[in-house]
Amino acid sequence: MTMKARALDDPPGGVLLWLIVGLELVTFAIVFALVAGVRRAQPDEFAAGQGALSPALGLTLTLLLITSGALAAQGVHRLRQTRLDDTRRWLLAAAGVGAAFLVVKAVDCSAHLGAGHRLGSSDFWDAYLLATGFHFVHVVVGVALLLFVSLRRAVFDDVETAYAGAALFWHLCDVVWFFLFPLFFVRA
């Protein structure tokens, strides 16, 4: 397997995936703007909601995604060195840490729901549950993509599009969390 030079209209991951990631970033930018608007319009309610969040838990979630993103990046680096077995191991490790993020986030969400923080209970909880829930769904998809490319034994027609594309989607999850974390967990 050799890596070929790619034209600008054929980026790693494919044009379609880059369009999807771009659209998702625009969608999340709208979500961020709406959350920032709620935070600005209702500072007392937002502060009260933040008081129920654990900054340590938010930091733990952030560190899990940073670690997983670094593992995925190493996988792509190994791919560029044409070390496919190493690529698979790094992306599988990234998926494992991503799965740990999902478990921690699910426990967090369950605790908040158990405490009565549900959709409709306040604008803060609506924003928190919808924004982080939307991100959660993306992380599920990202973990599934990483697992799919890591565990598939058949060779892809375009190896770089498969592996770099999965990592690209995974980095979308990282970038989005880097905005969600300060919006919700950092008190003004």
Image: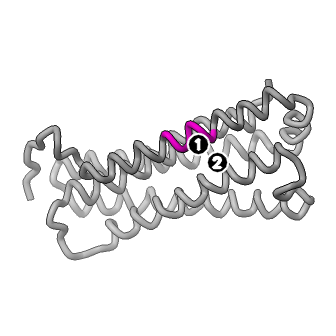
Crowding at dot 1, Cα within 10 Å, few <14 / some 14-19 / many 20+, comes out as: many
Crowding at dot 2, Cα within 10 Å, few <14 / some 14-19 / many 20+, comes out as: many
Which amino acid, mark 1? Answer: Trp
Q: Position of residue 36 (x, y in %)?
A: 71, 31
User: Which residue is at the front of the view, 172 or 17?
Assistant: 17
- Asked if residue 66 can be seen in this view, the reply is no
Q: What secondary structure is found at the residue carrying circle 1?
A: helix
Quadrant the C terminus occupies: top right
Q: Is residue 89 left or right of residue 39?
A: left
User: Which region shows up in magenta?
Assistant: 26-31
Which residue appears at 61% of the width and 43% of the height?
62
| SS majority, magenta | helix
Q: What secondary structure is found at the residue carrying circle 2?
A: helix
Dot label at residue 61: 2
Q: Position of residue 94 (x, y in %)?
A: 44, 56
Which residue appears at 55% of the width and 42% of the height?
176
User: Which residue is at the front of the view, 157 or 3?
Assistant: 157
Q: Position of residue 93 (x, y in %)?
A: 43, 59
Magenta segment includes 13: no
Q: Nearer the viewer, mark 2 or mark 1?
A: 1
**Contact between labelled residues 1 and 2, with CB atoms less than 8 Å apart:** yes
Which residue appears at 23% of the width and 48% of the height?
12
- Asked if residue 14 can be seen in this view, the reply is yes
The scheme the figure's colours follow is: one colour
Which callout, 2 or 1, points at the residue further toward the start of the chain? 2
Which residue appears at 34% of the width and 62% of the height?
89
| Vertical relation: 148 (above or below) 90 | below
In the picture of the structure, the residue carrying the numbered disc 1 is 177
Which amino acid, mark 2? Answer: Leu
Q: Residue furthest top?
A: 188
Q: Position of residue 1 (x, y in %)?
A: 9, 59
